[in-house]
Image (spheres, rainbow, N blue to C red):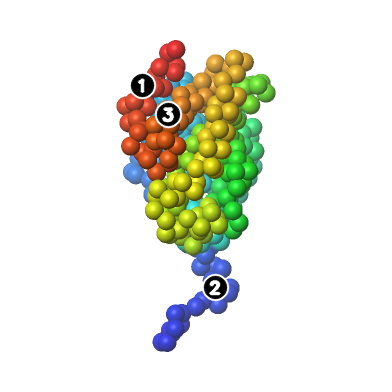
């Protein structure tokens, strides 16, 4: 097919196949020669989620591979938005992961290093609903209609961070009681909300046509960072209060000790809150007040020792 005077357009049927091909092409990673599924997952988490990587180092050795798989899965679905050019491709990608979970439950895992590693988790069926919730939460990344209200951000944080932390806790303690699960959910929700705050400067500079901040991001377009920060301050204050409340809720004395490697993110959340406070509540100035990777490791070490 050739087009001389205008961009070439695919017929609807072929356009649909084209989107599916693009989405599926991005889902199959290249593994290095001899690299195992666990090594692949560990390398991904170390590269893309260093703080969870550090926290998993304090887990018992027999559970570390499972945590690498869990956190690599999280990265796979979290990077959906940044790796696609339009929402429909992102939807196809997320549906692929839903079907991958179904395959794991049916005993027919797909040929993908992260899927294969997930399938090796002993209680994968137990945590599968939590993983499904993470996928559903990430679908919100693909659309920018409406306003990014606090309630919407809260739901997003609980689906993505809360559900993921519960899954991690169940890997370490499959028989964890409801009090422990609530602590894990609160800890993960606080971590995810902090992630939203820390990512605000990057989200506002996003040039994609679809934006997770919706009309809020559009209304701030073209403003200086100081002006953006001023307009965002009421929402940031509300988000910060939520993080503080969730961290308090996660510090229940009844939480079983086995899940400490997941709850350890609380100690890092405290450091990020301190950075935000030193930046006078301005997310655009946070980065200059954050501790480095060595400081994060020492923070986690102190958490586990004391």
Res 142 → quadrant: bottom right
* Sequence-first disc among 2 and 1: 2
Where residue 269 appears, as percent x and y from the top left, is 47, 29
Q: Which residue is mark 3?
A: 274
* Sequence-first disc among 3 and 1: 3
Where residue 211 appears, as percent x and y from the top left, is 51, 56
Report helix, strand or loop for mark 1.
helix
For this view, does 286 lie left or right of residue 141? left
Where residue 188 appears, as percent x and y from the top left, is 55, 32
Q: Which residue is mark 2?
A: 14
Res 198 → quadrant: top left
Other-residue count near label 1 (Cα within 10 Å), few / some / many at <14 / 14–19 / ≥20: few
Report helix, strand or loop for mark 3.
helix
Label 2, label 3: how far apart the Cα atoms are: 52 Å
Where residue 280 appears, as percent x and y from the top left, is 42, 35
Residue 88 vertical placement versus 159 (above, below): below
Tell which of 242 and 279 is nearer to you.
279
- Disc number for residue 298: 1
């Amino acid at each position: 097919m050739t087009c001389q005077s205008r961009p070439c357009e695919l017929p609807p049927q072929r356009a649909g196949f084209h989107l599916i091909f693009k989405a599926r092409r991005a889902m199959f990673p290249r593994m290095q020669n001899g690299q195992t599924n666990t090594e692949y997952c560990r390398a991904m988490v170390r590269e893309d989620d260093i703080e969870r990587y550090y926290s998993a180092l304090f887990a018992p050795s027999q559970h570390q591979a499972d945590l690498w798989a869990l956190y690599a899965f999280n990265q796979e679905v979290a990077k959906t938005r940044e790796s696609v050019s339009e929402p429909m491709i992102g939807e196809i990608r997320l549906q692929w992961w839903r079907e991958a979970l179904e395959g794991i439950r049916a005993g027919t895992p797909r040929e993908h290093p992260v899927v294969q590693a997930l399938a090796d988790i002993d209680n994968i069926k137990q945590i599968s609903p939590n993983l499904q919730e993470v996928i559903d939460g990430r679908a919100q990344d693909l659309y920018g209609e409406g306003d990014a209200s606090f309630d919407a951000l809260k739901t997003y944080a609980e689906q993505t961070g809360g559900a993921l932390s519960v899954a991690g806790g169940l890997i370490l303690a499959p028989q964890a009681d409801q009090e422990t699960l609530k602590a894990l959910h609160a800890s993960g929700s606080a971590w995810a909300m902090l992630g939203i705050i820390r990512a605000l400067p990057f989200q506002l500079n996003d040039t994609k046509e679809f934006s997770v901040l919706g009309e809020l991001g559009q209304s701030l377009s073209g403003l200086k960072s100081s002006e953006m920060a001023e307009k965002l301050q009421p929402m940031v204050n509300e988000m910060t209060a939520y993080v503080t409340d969730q961290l308090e809720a996660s510090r229940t004395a009844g939480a079983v000790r086995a899940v400490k490697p997941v709850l350890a993110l609380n100690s890092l959340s405290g450091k990020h809150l301190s950075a935000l406070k030193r930046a006078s509540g301005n997310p655009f100035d946070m980065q200059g007040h954050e501790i480095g990777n060595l400081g994060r490791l020492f923070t986690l070490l102190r958490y586990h020792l004391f």
